[in-house]
Amino acid sequence: MSLTLAIRSLFTNGHSNEWLVVKFAQTGDKKLFELLYDNCADDLYHFLVTQSDIHLAKDISQKTWLTVFEKPQLYRESGRFSAWLFTIARNKLLDEFRRTNRWQSMTDDIQNKQKIPFAYTDTIEDVFNTSLMTLPFEQREAFCLQQEGFGLQEIANITRSGVETVKSRIRYAKNSLREQLEKYHD
Amino acid sequence: MTKPNEQEHGSSKHNAHFETRISDLYQQRKSKTKSTASMKRQILQRAESEPAPHGWFRSFQRIAFAAGTLLLLSLVALQSYEFRQSPNRLVYTSVELHNIDDHQSQDYTQLSQRYQQHYQDYLQQQALLASHHQKSAILTQFENGWELRTCNQELVKISKELVATLQQMNLINGHFKSGDSVEVVFNVSGLIVGINPNKTMLKC
């Protein structure tokens, strides 16, 4: 365990995810893995649901956590554990999209969804959800990752894009959401 | 009409409000989409069926550590054994001291004298070598012979008889008068074997 992680764990209430994964890699203690899962599973699952659907999200989530279980030593202490986790998940999701040729069908779905008008009975949450899901994949993932608390550089690393590209994607996503929400208010 | 600063302030306030609004909506959406207990159970069950991560690596580490410790202890034990055995293996060497008589002292004196003689010879040879290298000189004639003066203020006197002998042996090439610049040729032993005219005037 590195000195940095040891000091950080002293100042944090309980152990950080970084400390947990390093310790798990050293000891193989499954309780540590369970703690990691409890800390991050909801965030990851929601991200995957937003980027795909419930069934694929469950599948990719399971595969991602098994990778963490089997290869915790691949985690590098230079970054946050959650960034590493989301990177694994995103790569697995894209692999699955490529394997099943689903990428094209998702784009078509988005184009169709954009044509769906809001109903008068829709709540603001419904409008937000629909607007979010109609965003292009890259804009949606950049927006979600920002909402999950990742910085621009971390998002750029996770999505293997440039920081400026990430900034643009987030700006476009927010503009679209703003436009849809303003339409709802009007 | 509102001022630009007020417009900017209003715009940033509106943006901040929008940011808060969409963050709230995102968190509301997130609260409705959570991983289930069955998902956790499935993952943990599959993890249970897997061997502990890097079990072989930790086993290897333990074996390596044990082997290293064993090797270290063996080396220490071997060293300790050799140290205990070492007195029996000591090899003694006896040295006898002989007396020093006067004969040796005399030898030393003779040796010292010979050394001084060789040193004097060496100094002579060095001086000779220095003069051998200096070839150019200014010739001065007088009744008893010639004088050759070098730029280093060294004076070589050549007797009348020697001049005559050199002339007989055709070792003096030319007719010289006082003030001529000449080249004096020495052999390896430092003897004059020729005096030749120097085409360039020696200037000291």
Image (cartoon, helix red, strand yellow):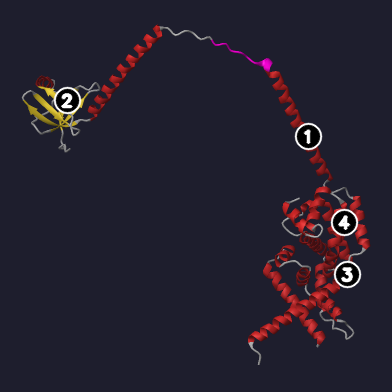
**In the foreground, B73 or B151:** B73
Q: Amino acid at mark 2?
A: Gly
Q: CA distance from mark 1 to mark 3?
A: 53 Å
**In the foreground, B187 or A34:** A34
Label disc, if present, on residue B194 of the rendered structure: 2
Q: Are marks 2 and 3 on the same chain?
A: yes
Q: Residue at x 93, y 62 (%)?
A: B37
Q: CA distance from mark 2 to mark 1?
A: 90 Å
Residue underneath mark 3: B33
Picture quadrant where residue B121 is located:
top left
Q: Nearer the viewer, mark 4 or mark 2?
A: 4
Q: Nearer the viewer, mark 2 or mark 3?
A: 3
Q: Are marks 1 and 3 on the same chain?
A: yes
Kindly state the secondary structure of the residue where label 1 is placed. helix
Q: Amino acid at mark 3?
A: Thr
Q: Chain of mark 1?
A: B
Report crowding for label 2: few under 14, some 14 to 19, many 20 or more residues within 10 A (C-alpha): some
Give the farthest residue toward the left. B143
Q: In the displayed structure, would residue B185 be above or below residue A162? A: above
Residue underneath mark 4: A34
The magenta-colored residue range is: B87-95
Q: Chain of mark 2?
A: B
Residue A83 at x, y percent in the picture: 76, 61
Kindly state the secondary structure of the residue where label 4 is placed. helix
Label disc, if present, on residue B67 of the rendered structure: 1
Q: Residue at x 88, y 62 (%)?
A: A59
Q: Nearer the viewer, mark 2 or mark 1?
A: 1
Report crowding for label 4: few under 14, some 14 to 19, many 20 or more residues within 10 A (C-alpha): some
